[in-house]
Amino acid sequence: MAQILVENLDPIILEKLETLAKQHGRSLQEELKQILQQAAEKATHYHTGGDMERTREAVARAQVRYTGKIFSDSTELIREDRER
């Protein structure tokens, strides 16, 4: 398995990571592995489009919810807000 060396890590960050590890009942190395795994999965999920079926279902629900509704033109409100 690969090893990673992180140099010049801010001592405050290290302290926060150690605190997180203690809170989760893990060693610092286990905590870092978990953080890296979650970040990699989240990035992969984001860049691959995520769960398209769930996205399609959410869009369909929104379309049903807002079908036939009339919304006011917010242009004037936005202009007023910008002028503040």
Image: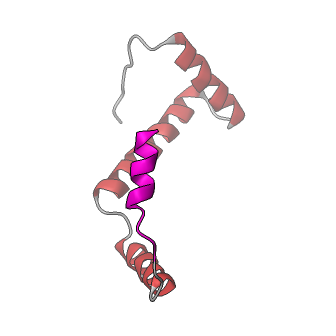
Give the x, y percent position of residue 5.
Answer: 37, 20
Q: Magenta includes 73?
A: yes
Give the x, y percent position of residue 29.
Answer: 53, 29
Residue, far left: 48
Which quadrant of the figure has residue 58?
A: bottom left
Quarter of the N terminus within the rendering: top left
Which residue appears at 41% of the width and 41% of the height? Answer: 83
Display colour scheme: secondary structure
Which residue appears at 56% of the width and 34% of the height? Answer: 31
Give the x, y percent position of residue 11.
Answer: 53, 11
Relative placement, left or right, of 70 versus 5 is right
Q: Nearer the viewer, residue 62 or 21?
A: 62
Task: Give the number of callouts.
Answer: 0
Image height check: is 23 above or below 39?
above
Magenta highlight: main SS: helix
Which quadrant of the figure has residue 4?
A: top left
Which residue appears at 47% of the width and 46% of the height? Answer: 38
Image height check: is 63 above or below 28?
below
Give the x, y percent position of residue 81.
Answer: 46, 46
Q: Nearer the viewer, residue 11 or 73?
A: 73
Q: Magenta includes 59?
A: no
Relative placement, left or right, of 56 versus 69 is left
Image height check: is 21 above or below 38?
above
Q: Which residues are magenta?
A: 71-84
Relative placement, left or right, of 70 versus 1 is right
Q: Nearer the viewer, residue 58 or 36?
A: 58
Which residue appears at 47% of the width and 38% of the height? Answer: 84
Image height check: is 80 above or below 23?
below
